[in-house]
Image: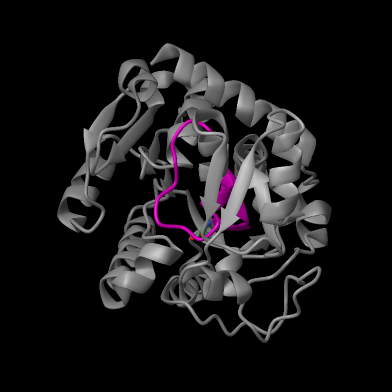
């Protein structure tokens, strides 16, 4: 039987790329993009899109039944920086939306797989910073991190208690050119490319030596699809998998950009997001994902930088 895939948060940084990949795999008509805002034109033009607020569970249930949904990717969330501005609202949105999706999957057998993103934000200042293991101390200090850690526990709970096959990745900072993130702590690593192309200078909200785990979006999409395609028996983690790509500091990224744009300058003006970044790991040990899913990243810093600059230049030429 054909899979019908629902993507919640299709207009976001991950969703806008994942939808196109899922349409390639399952067929355009079988991948239902939804969001509370309009997604990019290629998503609108290539298959079904509908406005859907995941907090409206009646609408969600109708949607799932009407379209015979068999897989749900729930990507809608308030990211780390924005969540610190409105902690209780962020907690409510992040948690309630996940529970609503898990409940739908529990109630409707046809929904046989769920994907939900976790984050390196589940770790905190007491976590080992280098090669952070899958299983370790987890005392996140941000509301975003607390919601992701609680969410991981709920995912595992629904798997063990009700057999809901929910899969998850602790994404590092994601770097992409199609849709900008919004309100995250790792967003500097996207903004810097736009600023480099447009202005030749950037004011960074983290200081120059802040090392964080990062990943190019093409790798993140592949990691997600590969995880979702694994037979359930091969998975040993039912909370969320550590996956690693690259780790770098703003200063290292700026140096790499300077190889293409020699006069590029960066000023450092750390804001409240510095404390968030300081509480997160420097690098991630993803050996379990490598064993279970054969995971391996493909984009290193030079390759990612080259693609980012090339694609962002193209965007500016079009406009
Ligand atoms: N990239 C996210 C953020 O900065 C972390 O998951 O909020």
Query: Quadrant location of residue 67?
Result: top left
Check residue 188 for magenta coloring: yes
Question: What range is drawn magenta here?
Answer: 167-189
Residue shown at 44% from the left, 70% from the top:
144
Residue 312 appearing in the image: yes
Residue shown at 36% from the left, 63% from the top:
82
Residue 280, horizontal then vertical, whole percent:
63, 72
Q: Describe residue 212's horizontal placement relative to residue 89 as left or right.
A: right
Residue shown at 52% from the left, 51% from the top:
203
Residue shown at 83% from the left, 60% from the top:
287
Q: Nearer the viewer, residue 181 or 18?
A: 181
Give the answer, above or below, for where 227 lies relative to 211: above
Residue 239 appearing in the image: no
Residue 149, horizontal then vertical, whole percent:
52, 74
Give the answer, above or below, for where 138 lies relative to 115: below
Q: Nearer the viewer, residue 214 or 122?
A: 214
Query: Quadrant location of residue 138?
Result: bottom right
Residue 230, horizontal then vertical, whole percent:
68, 45
């Amino acid at each position: 039987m054909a899979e019908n895939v629902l993507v919640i948060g299709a207009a976001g940084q991950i969703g806008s790329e994942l939808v196109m990949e899922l349409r390639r795999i399952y067929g355009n008509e079988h991948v239902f993009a939804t969001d509370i805002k309009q997604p990019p034109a290629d998503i609108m033009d290539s298959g079904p899109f509908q406005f859907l607020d995941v907090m409206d569970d009646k609408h969600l249930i109708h949607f799932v039944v009407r379209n015979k949904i068999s897989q749900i990717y729930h990507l809608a969330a308030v990211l780390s920086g924005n969540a610190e501005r409105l902690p209780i609202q962020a907690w409510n949105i992040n948690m309630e939306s996940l529970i609503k999706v898990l409940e739908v999957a529990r109630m409707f057998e046809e929904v046989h797989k769920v994907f939900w993103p976790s984050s390196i934000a589940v770790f905190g200042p007491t976590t080992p910073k280098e090669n952070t293991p899958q299983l370790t101390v987890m005392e996140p200090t941000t509301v975003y991190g607390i919601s992701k850690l609680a969410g991981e526990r709920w995912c595992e709970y629904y798997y063990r208690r009700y057999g809901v096959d929910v899969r998850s990745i602790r994404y590092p900072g994601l770097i992409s050119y199609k849709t900008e993130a919004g309100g995250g702590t790792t967003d500097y690593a996207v903004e810097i490319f736009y600023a480099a192309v447009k202005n030749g200078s950037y004011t960074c909200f983290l200081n120059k030596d802040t090392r964080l785990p990062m990943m190019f979006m093409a790798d993140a999409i592949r990691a997600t699809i590969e995880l979702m395609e694994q037979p359930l028996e091969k998975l040993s983690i039912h909370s969320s998998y550590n996956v690693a790509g690259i780790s770098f500091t703003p200063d290292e990224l700026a140096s790499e950009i300077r190889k293409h744009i020699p006069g590029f300058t960066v000023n450092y003006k750390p804001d409240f997001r510095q404390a968030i970044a300081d509480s997160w790991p420097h690098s991630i040990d993803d050996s379990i994902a490598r064993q279970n899913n054969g995971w391996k990243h493909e984009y290193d810093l030079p390759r990612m930088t080259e693609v980012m600059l090339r694609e962002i230049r193209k965007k500016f030429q079009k406009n």
